[in-house]
Amino acid sequence: MSRRHDNICTRFALSQLYGVSRLSVFRSRRNFLMDSAVVAKGSLLTLSLPAILSACQRSQLALEQGAEFRVFDAETAADLIAIAARIIPTDDTPGATEAGVIYFLDTIFDEPKRASQLASLKEGLLTLREQLPPDGRYFYELDEKQQDLLLSDNEQTPFFVTMRFLTIAGTFSLPMYGGNRNKVGYQLIGYEDRGAWWPPYGFYDADHVERGE
Amino acid sequence: MAEVAFPSFSTREEVDFVIVGTGAAGGVIAKELSVAGHSVVLLEQGPHLQASDFHHDEWAYDHNLELTWGRSQGYPQTFRKFESDVAEEREMVCGYAHNVGGSSMHFSGNFWRFRPIDFIEASVRGTIAGTNFSDWPITYSDLEPYYTKVDWEVGVSGLQGSWDPPRSREYPCPPMPIKGSDVLLERAAKAMGLNPYPAPVAILSQPHNGRPGCIHCGFCNGYGCEVNAKSSSLVTMIPLALASGNCELRTHCTVHRVDTNEKGRATEVVYWGADGVVQAQRAKAVVLCANGSETPRLLLMSESAQHPDGLANSSGMVGKNLMFNGYSTVMGLFDEPVNAYKSVPATRVVHDFYELDPSVGFYGGGGIDGRHPSRGTPMGFALMAAPAFGTPAWGSDFKADLAYQFAHAAAFDGHTTSLPLSTNNITLDPTVKDKFGRPAIRTTYMDHPDDIETMRWFYEKTVEMMQIAGASNIVGDYERDGQEGNVHLLGTCRMGNDPDSSVIDATNRAHDVPNLFMCDGSSLVTSGRGQPTMTIMALAFRAGELISRAARRNEI
């Protein structure tokens, strides 16, 4: 057990282990997103969401469909899609784009109580855009390598930390919130979304029975 | 079956009992008193949710606190490590579910009994300078019949054996099937000469008392059970209380005061009703089961000329001796799929270190069980895995790592003792208020050095177990700088024979107020080893019986 491992397993990690059950989680989520507001259930159930974005169409389609977002203009949506796509990329399996993370964002930020969080998010995006090359206006216009470099430079900023949090939340939360479409998040990590099981659950308990332990 | 007539009492009618809180203790006492024929008004600040309301919704429960409530819902709390600090406002410090059934609705279901040593440890082990470590006024054998009542009436799954503390009756349900995470724990423990055994849980492994067996969905800890297999107050006790015809349940009621008269007796409980209008329910006796943070706050808020330091607080012990239980966690990756996200949190426990040998140089003890590192939650794991394992936090490598880690990870957790200290306490925050204007719960807490040493000991032991189990990428930690919140809220109205050093007597009656009773985590004299709910429920069965008996003899 190296000292490095001790340091790596930060309080953040520990707190996330327990979530609601162990309260340290509440002090780990002190980025600006978590400071206030709940998701209003009613508004989430009345959504009429546009079609899934495919990987090859992602930013362009967002631009064309910009009018369908409730809280983002087309350029903001396209940039957020592009950022989420660098956090959980589309490679040999679906990523944040196919999960519909942008629709998750559009859903939760439509809640009036999140207005100040949305403003902070948009402000963070503007700060990111200020770092674009002189002729650049939007993040999504960069190639992927340039995008990764810029995000690496911003890895410790509240904006990136929040976008990482939201991309993961949008990929793995219940599809009712607009993301995790076709349960691509569950498929990615090998989570069988059956809601009920009977043993054997995995290799080791099957082996336990087989050996008669 | 005839339809049950639910009573509706007038607030001006003096009912036999008002009970504040419907959780592990309040549910049991409401059932015991109402079935025994006493009239009961049961007050709950949250809603009456049902199984059909519960979902595997991490976004709502873990990240928006829809079951537990926090600052976002208008209930801020404050925290400081030391009494010399100014407390800082937090989303939440003391955590508990706000709903009928209280935290028994969303808890993990781990249901260890306390052992005989827990009640007499100060005598056996010796007192500890600078602490309030002391014996209970009751022993394990006093409580054993009530542990057995909980086993059968509430519903516990387990396997009796030499590992158990003495028990008068077998478990009603067999143990849960072993999970891969606990196969790994069991093999490592046996290789070390230890004695792992099936974990007792308040989750049904097979139908019992008209409720179904568990479907092993994996969402226990932090979630409500969607099939009523978890043995919460919500589904075991409250329905019986309501069916008695003697209990009126009032939800969305926020209590802020217990009034007393010139004779020093409690007369009524004052609360805001669901419509926000102030009500005061008169009663012959009051039972507070609001949990180890809310019960002392309510007593402190009920100060009067006669009780200037808060109600039932002549000892000065109301709110003091807060104990969280310590914990440690170590996780690792295994070659084959563990799939620890399926089924109940833990199916094996190691209690060989229940009492650490005094030669270690500090006081402490605990238990170890196997788990999934993120309680099996997909979003929680995806957020936590990279910083924990030190793997890339975003990009294709992050994604590839996640795809492997989720099913291949297991954790071994330590659950440990906390010492009772006057300096660890619940008080009224002088400035921060909740949305009703009640002073926020202010927590002052710094783990005793022995508690931190105990966590460290368990951390190091579980690292060794992980290595023996064959894990790679072993990482973990313990609360080396002291805890800053928890869901175990123990000791803040401690039980004792001496009115100068305790708040309630051995029958859960306030020393200072003859018709006021407290029963919940606050009653505990010592912390046990990290799974207090079974003992809270057993105490509640005992208190319910004793209170009913006293009422019938006109001795309240």
Image: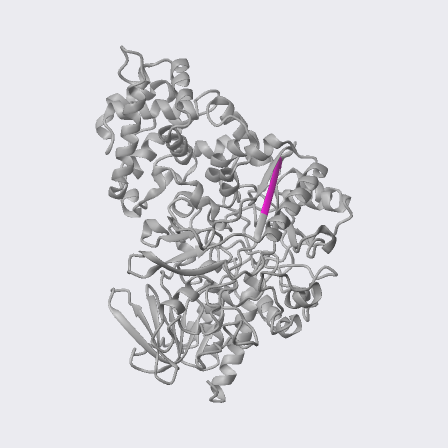
Q: Choose top left, top right, bottom left or bottom right for residue B63.
A: top left
**Residue A49, image quadrant:** top left
Residue A2: where, in percent of width, then height? 64, 31
Residue, far left? A67
Place of residue A59 in the rendered image (x, y in percent of width and height, measured from the top left): 31, 20
In the displayed image of the protein, which residue is found farthest to the top? A135
The residue positioned farthest toward the front in the image shown: B84
Residue nearest the observer in this picture, B20 or A5: A5
Q: Is B422 placed left or right of B90 in the picture?
A: right
Tell me which secondary structure the magenta stretch mostly adopts. Answer: strand
Instruction: Write down the region rendered in magenta.
Output: B328-332
**Residue B510 visible to the viewer:** yes
Q: Is residue B97 visible?
A: no
Instruction: Examine the rendered structure and indicate whether residue A25 appears above or below residue B426.
Output: above
> B56 above or below B209?
above
Count of numbered badges drawn on the protein: 0
Q: Is residue B274 above or below residue A152?
A: below
Q: Position of residue B491 (x, y in %)?
A: 52, 64
Q: Is residue B82 left or right of residue B506?
A: left
Residue lying at the far bottom in this picture: please name it. Answer: B553
Q: Quadrant of the N terminus of chain B?
A: bottom left
Q: Is residue B330 magenta?
A: yes
Residue at 49%, 30% in the rendered image: A188
**In the foreground, B457 or B209:** B457
Residue at 24 percent across and 33 percent down: it is: A71
Q: Position of residue B87 (x, y in %)?
A: 40, 51
Closest to the observer, B332 or B212: B332
The colour scheme used here is: one colour
Residue B205 within the magenta-colored segment of the rendering: no
Residue A195 appears left or right of B246: right
